[in-house]
Amino acid sequence: MIAPAAIRTVFMGTPEFALPTLQGLLSAGVDLCAVFTQPDRPRGRGKLLAPPPVKEMAVAHGLPIFQPQKLRDPAVVETLRSLRPDLIVVVAYGQILPASILDIPRYGCINVHASLLPRYRGAAPINKAIVDGEQVTGVTTMLMDVGLDTGDMLVKRATEIGIEETAGQLHDRLALLGREAMAETLRRLCEGTLRPEPQDDAQSSYAPMMKKEDGRIDWRHPARDIHNLVRGLSPWPGAFTSWNGQMLKLGRTLAEEGPDAEPGTVVAADGCGVCIACGQGVLRVRELQLAGKKKLPAGDFLRGASLSVGTRLETGHGLPEGS
């Protein structure tokens, strides 16, 4: 049995998703000797440099902080080696760890990944699981290797995806689930009962980084698929259509039965939503947002815009102006 305080640990993470796991390591009492996070970036309308969330938490706890531009820089590798970590925990750090770092800690580098591996390896597993209409997802702790999320699995935690749940909402739940999975991983590591399990590559799938263009709606698709696209890309990059040459973003949708009409045609519009014909069924849209404007409930939007029955929405080519 190893005491957590005897495990000299480096944490690598950057966004809010990583915070619960970092807090969990602090609560478990590991010897956190350093935190690595991305450099400060410009943020907001003023483009002022702002620290990543993990840096803010590390500062609050008085932890040593490193923000290298490139992790594979030999000087950075040497710095890590000089810290003599027994374990490196990685959560959404934002850079790939080279083999020269993976080999440093005797207990390895453990990553908290937001999917049930080997499904949805890659940068956007939360978004892609919803876009694909998955009903269950989860988190996996993984012993990292040189591949992209291909390392041996350690601990899994599964959760159901709500029918209206957005990527943002699921993100927050999985961040907490990641803390639980890492706590269980650490407990088993201390007990000597951690048993790595190889991934079955034949069952793998890939979730690449989402782009704005991924949000363009093709109304010929079934309403259920478009509903999944809207919530899977919320809050970013957002699903959109083109209306009068403008980008019209859609939020809070439902897939319903409805009258047959040409895909993209508005078949109803009132305070309960704007209903748009799809290749199969109708999409009820309860929130709408024009480029540069606030997101509004359907009733408020319709009081200021003439999105009437019979209007045809277009997918268009390329991003509309103002995107």
Image: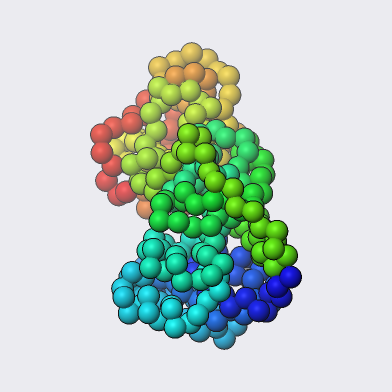
Q: Position of residue 160 (x, y in %)?
A: 67, 40
* Left or right, residue 256 beside residue 291: right
Q: Position of residue 297 (x, y in %)?
A: 55, 43
**Closer to the camera, 23 or 200?**
200
**Closer to the camera, 128 or 74?**
74
**Closer to the camera, 256 or 65?**
65
Q: Position of residue 33 (x, y in %)?
A: 55, 81
Question: Measuring 48% from the left and 23% from the top, which residue is drawn there?
Answer: 222
The answer to whether residue 270 is above or below residue 129 is: above
* Left or right, residue 68 beside residue 164: left
Q: Position of residue 156 (x, y in %)?
A: 64, 49
Question: Measuring 60% from the left and 70% from the top, which residue is drawn there?
Answer: 22
Question: Measuring 52% from the left and 39% from the top, which residue is drawn there?
Answer: 200
Instruction: Tell me the quarter of the image containing the N terminus.
Output: bottom right
- Looking at the image, the residue that sits furthest to the top is 260
* Left or right, residue 240 beside residue 58: left
The answer to whether residue 266 is above or below residue 299 is: above
